[in-house]
Amino acid sequence: MTAATLSLDPISPAIRPTQQDSDQRYRYQHYIDGAFVDPASNAWLETSDPVTGEDWAWVARGDAADVERAVTAAHRAFSEGAWPALSASGRGALMRKLGDLITENADWLARVEMRDNGKLFAELSMQMRYMANYYYYYGGLADKIEGTVIPTDKPGVFNYTRPEPIGVVACIMPWNSPLPLTSLKLAPALAAGCTVVLKPSEFTSASLLEFVKLVEAAGFPKGVVNVITGYGAEVGDALISHKLVERIAFTGGPEAGRMINEKAARHMKRVTLELGGKSPNIVFDDAELDQAIKGAVAGIFAASGQTCVAGSRLLVQDTIHDAFVERLKAFIADVRFGHPSDPATQVAPISTRPQLEKIKSYVEIAKSEGARLVAGGEPASVPGYPKGLFFKPTIFVDVKNSMRIAQEEVFGPVLSVIRFKDEDEAVRIANDTQFGLAAGIWTQSMRRALTMANRVRAGTVWVNNYRSTSTTSPFGGFKMSGVGREGGIAGIREYMETKSVWISTATDIPNPFIRR
């Protein structure tokens, strides 16, 4: 197998022209202990461009042997050498350097990720630049996580606590936002002093393997960050069960999350799980409707609906329901499909062929359940891209909250519109799901905004906006939407243990047979 090597000058990357010839595909190896290495089995996976449908790169197909190498390297780096000898301030300096390199190379990272998962370059470019803030924020936080001196009720002892890194962390990412979701995990783990093995989706591994070159250029010691690519059943399972891995950080679907949680529990491993949602976006009749329309579009059709916080259930008060739906249909009637690098493109392709087929199947399920299709519902034909994985923004009305289309995560541009009468009914419908990741509320009433935010069971509630996020704010879900929090100070504490230290100041130890 012949393949080109995709190189990256971490200061000023030369963006090579797209190579279409199958003999000139890029080849991406694992990154283990500071070096790019072939998989132990010499097996490779093809990765394709969702816009053209063409395979453009080979990605290493990892197995348990590769996981063993990576975890061993991470454990060695955690236990000895330059990394544990580095002060918290020193870790912060490395992270700020990494943030600078991300900023300098943001467009390059965006182009690689765009080719792998098809998201709009305009959005990815902003995401990559913002991603640097994770490393700035947690780099600054690294030396500010303090222990405490505890005024105990025991005389003659001095008691204090110290936060310590948990150890080797395995981070498993999905295909929809590989680098931003990696940074939500990697930045706090590094700031805490952990070492990491990263496992991207087999569909979208390339951008992470370009990014890790920046980690190396920033000066992180060998073994601190490792990347293993391949299938979940072959790499993910080996990571979850490895005896030297202390925490699993996963973003993905609830079924995979449940399996990971069960397997991790057998080995007493900690987990952070973000498992998606079926988020309600609630529009009251006193809302600023122009803004609410934009919020509904942003909630479900941005990123082609491939986001964990998608506002896939649009709850509209019945007094404005029909008019609101008509305005929403008009808003999306002329959306522009095209190549994600084109600034005029509004709707990019679905990232993977299996996901496209899943979306199509849910459209048929919704029809069979009695939901009424009023927009979209089929793949889009885009001139110049006959093999592209495009799908039209889709709206169903007459949706009952008990329908599968309202209860199960589609992860695509499919919107279920549900009527409600008043606040109580809106709350009942909003909370009537196994998920609880996010919610939106559109109203001009301050009283209603506050009371609804309190009553809706979701880890994030947006009022008169949707999809706002920050490095400084915790993110995570209630119920089946996950365990733990990412972002903010809460994010770094997920990667730390608290040690309690007792020092005797007494001159004599009393009866040793009695606990005091």
Image (spheres, rainbow, N blue to C red):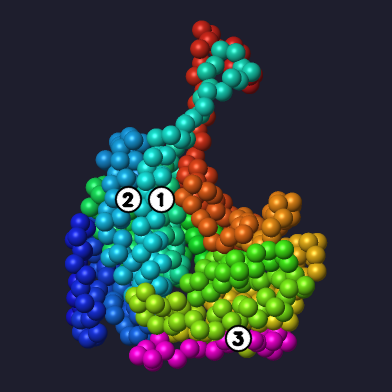
Which type of secondary structure does the marked residue at label 1 adopt? helix
Marks 2/3: CA–CA distance: 42 Å
Dot 3: few (<14), some (14–19), or many (≥20) neighbours within 10 Å?
some
Q: Which residues are magenta?
A: 365-388
In the displayed structure image, the side of residue 121 where residue 438 appears, left or right:
right
Dot placed on the residue nearer the N-terminal end, 3 or 1: 1
Q: Residue 134's mark?
A: 1
Q: Position of residue 128 (x, y in %)?
A: 36, 60
Say few, some or many: other residues with alpha carbon within 10 Å of mark 1 (under 14 / 14 to 19 / 20 or more). many
N-term mark: 2 or 3: 2
Q: Which residue lies under the disc numbered 2?
A: 99
Cβ atoms under marks 2 and 1 closer than 8 Å: yes
Queried whether the magenta region covers residue 373, the answer comes back as yes
Q: Main secondary structure of the magenta part?
A: loop
* Residue at 46% from the left image edge and 78% from the top image edge: 347
Q: On the image, numbered disc 3 is attached to which residue?
A: 375
Tell me if label 2 and label 3 are in contact, CB under 8 Å: no
Nearest to the observer: residue 127 or residue 364: 127
Q: Foreground mark, 3 or 1?
A: 3
Q: Amino acid at mark 3?
A: Ala
